C-alpha cells in the first residue's frame, strides 16, 4: 500500500507540473492576444475578431484546471472555521475529511452535466473562431478530475496528521495565539 501511494505521488507530481506549465502557457497566450489586439486597435485601427473568444477560452481553462493546483496546496476557500475552533484532534480530522469528501462528491455529481454540455455543444463553433464550443466545456471535465486527484493526494496525509495532533497550526490559530500573547504581555507588537 505504501509503495502504491508513493507511485501515485510521483504520477501526481508529474501531473501537477504539466498543469502548471499548461496554465502558464495559457496566461502567456492571454497576455499576448490582449497586447496584439490592443496595439492593433489603437495603432492600426483593426482588432481581431477572435481575440475576445481566445482570451475567454484561455481564462476558463486556467480557472478550471488551475483550481486543481490550489486543491493540491489545500488553499481553496473552505468553511473550516468550525474545524479551527474545535480542540479535539480526532474530531478535526473527521471534519476535514468530510469537507474534502463533500467537495469531491460535488465535483463528481456535476460531471454528467458537463459531459452533456460537451455533447450538446459539440457541433457548434465558438463565435469568431473555427474552434468547436465543446473545447470550452471540456475545461470543467479536465479541471474536476484534476481537482479530485489533488484532493486524493493531500487529504489522507492531512487527516492522519490531524488525527495524531501533529498538524501544523493554521493561520487562524497562529493569529489567535499571537493576539492572546499580546494581551498577556508575553510579546511586544
Image (cartoon, rainbow, N blue to C red):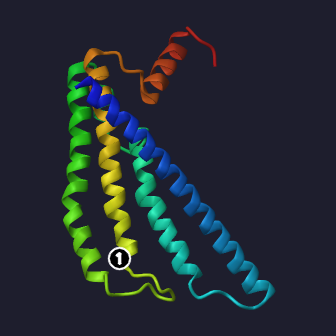
**At x 31% / y 45%, what residue is drawn?**
149
The foreground one among 7 and 171 is 7
Residue 17 as seen in the image, left or right of residue 32: left
Residue 1 image position (x, y, % from top left): 22, 26
Q: Would you call the spot at circle 1 few (<14 residues within 10 Å), some (14-19), or many (20 or more)?
A: many
**At x 34% / y 49%, what residue is drawn?**
147
Placement of 39 over or under 148, stated as above or below: below
Residue 37 as seen in the image, left or right of residue 61: right
Q: Is residue 138 visible?
A: yes
Q: Is residue 86 visible?
A: no
Residue 20 image position (x, y, % from top left): 51, 50
- Give the number of marks: 1
Image quadrant for the C terminus?
top right
Q: Residue furthest right?
A: 43
Quadrant of the image occupied by residue 182: top right
Residue pointed to by mark 1: 134
| SS label for mark 1 | helix
Q: Residue furthest bottom?
A: 45
Residue 60 image position (x, y, % from top left): 45, 66
**At x 42% / y 52%, what residue is drawn?**
67
The foreground one among 122 and 175 is 122
Residue 170 as seen in the image, left or right of residue 107: right
Residue 54 image position (x, y, % from top left): 54, 76
Quadrant of the image occupied by residue 8: top left
**At x 44% / y 43%, what residue is drawn?**
14
Placement of 49 over or under 178, stated as above or below: below
Amino acid at each position: 500500500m505504501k509503495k502504491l501511494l508513493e507511485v501515485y505521488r510521483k504520477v501526481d507530481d508529474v501531473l501537477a507540473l504539466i498543469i502548471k506549465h499548461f496554465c502558464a502557457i495559457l496566461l502567456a497566450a492571454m497576455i499576448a492576444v490582449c497586447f496584439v489586439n490592443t496595439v492593433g486597435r489603437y495603432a492600426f485601427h483593426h482588432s481581431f475578431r477572435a481575440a475576445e473568444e481566445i482570451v475567454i477560452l484561455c481564462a476558463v481553462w486556467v480557472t478550471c484546471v488551475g483550481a486543481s493546483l490550489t486543491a493540491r496546496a489545500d488553499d481553496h476557500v473552505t468553511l473550516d472555521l468550525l474545524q479551527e475552533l474545535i480542540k479535539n484532534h480526532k474530531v478535526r480530522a473527521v471534519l476535514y475529511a468530510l469537507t474534502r469528501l463533500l467537495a469531491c462528491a460535488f465535483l463528481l455529481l456535476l460531471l454528467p452535466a458537463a459531459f452533456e454540455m460537451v455533447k450538446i455543444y459539440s457541433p457548434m463553433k465558438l463565435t469568431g473562431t473555427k474552434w468547436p464550443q465543446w473545447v470550452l466545456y471540456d475545461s470543467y471535465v479536465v479541471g474536476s478530475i484534476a481537482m479530485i486527484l489533488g484532493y486524493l493526494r493531500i487529504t489522507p496525509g492531512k487527516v492522519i496528521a490531524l488525527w495524531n495532533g501533529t498538524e501544523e497550526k493554521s493561520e487562524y490559530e497562529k493569529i489567535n495565539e499571537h493576539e492572546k500573547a499580546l494581551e498577556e504581555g508575553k510579546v511586544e507588537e
